[in-house]
Image (spheres, rainbow, N blue to C red):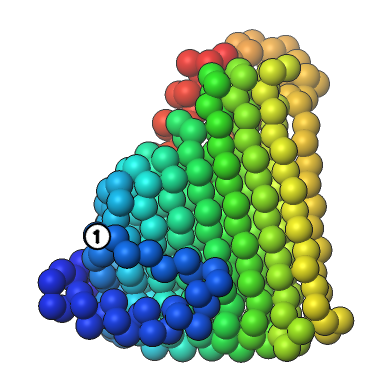
Amino acid sequence: MPTILRNAEAHATIEEADALLAHAAEWSALESRNVLAVRIPKGAGEEEEGLRISPEDGDRIVILVEPGASARIVELGEGAFSVDIVLREDARLTYCSWGEATRARRFALLLADAAVSWLDASHGGCGIDVTSCLSGKGSDARYMSVFLGAGSERYDVRSRMIHLGDKSTSNMLTRAVMLGASSGVYEGLIRIDERARGCDAYQKQETLLLSDDARMDATPNLEIRNEDVRCSHGVSLGQLDEEKVFYFLARGIPRVHAMRLIVEGFFADVLAAMGAQGEEARGVLLSRLEGSA
């Protein structure tokens, strides 16, 4: 099982990762902070519970996944911090974030045939910035996120897929439920370089507004610099379907429980992909829903 590296052992990993990240400096925005490192070798295995990391305010964590390695990381971060990841050739990483980050910047550089899956559940108001730089041929990045706003909370979620390698693929899905006077901004970007041929990319953002005062501003962006691609996006913004609510009420199910079932179904596929962390997230998110109903 990989572990967090410190002191001299950490420096070697950080230097190796930063040498690769320097090629993507426009997006990785390298910072000098309290730095910790994680090196994941081939054969370490992808434990079901994953390696847990807990970045704190001001931390930078550097993760280097070696060629052919596979792992799952669970981030339980607090405050403002950054995470930089390098996935070398044919590496696989599932990165599950579920904590109380106020501002988190996460970046991954993918070499040939590498793959990353970002899975995130947020609450309490936050700023999330996630960028995947698909540098290598055949690399693949997935981003799935849910958040539930209540009270006067504000969310700022930004996700980017930067395609530099041929036949790279990406998919982004963000789902939000907004209560009270909460508000959110979502900005998604798919950029496909003129040298990146045969790419396939898609992004979708869906929002349920459960009060008249809730707000969401969603902006999907496409920057396509060659014609040999398949790329599309979608945005949906809606209110609670009262016909669905009436269906539950007619069967003796209280309105607050009806709302819970509808929201639970809305979040279901993202939370299911998170595994055990998704179950924990489901309980917290839905209890906040009931407390605000």
Q: Is residue 264 above or below residue 72?
A: above
- Identity, as a three-letter code, of the amino acid under mark 1: Asn
Q: Position of residue 273 (x, y in %)?
A: 50, 55
Q: Residue at x 78, y 19 (%)?
A: 242
Q: Residue at x 70, y 66 (%)?
A: 190
Among the 4 quarters of the image, the one containing residue 184:
top right
Relative horizontal placement of residue 293, taking residue 194 as reference (left or right):
left
Quadrant that contains the C terminus: top right
Residue at the farthest front position: 32
Q: Position of residue 20 (x, y in %)?
A: 43, 84
Relative horizontal placement of residue 214, taking residue 105 as reference (left or right):
right
Q: Is residue 152 above or below residue 125?
A: above
Quadrant that contains the N terminus: bottom left
Q: Position of residue 65 (x, y in %)?
A: 36, 79
Q: Is residue 6 above or below residue 269?
A: below
Q: Residue at x 34, y 71 (%)?
A: 63
Between 241 and 112, the residue placed more toward the observer is 112
Relative horizontal placement of residue 237, taking residue 139 as reference (left or right):
right
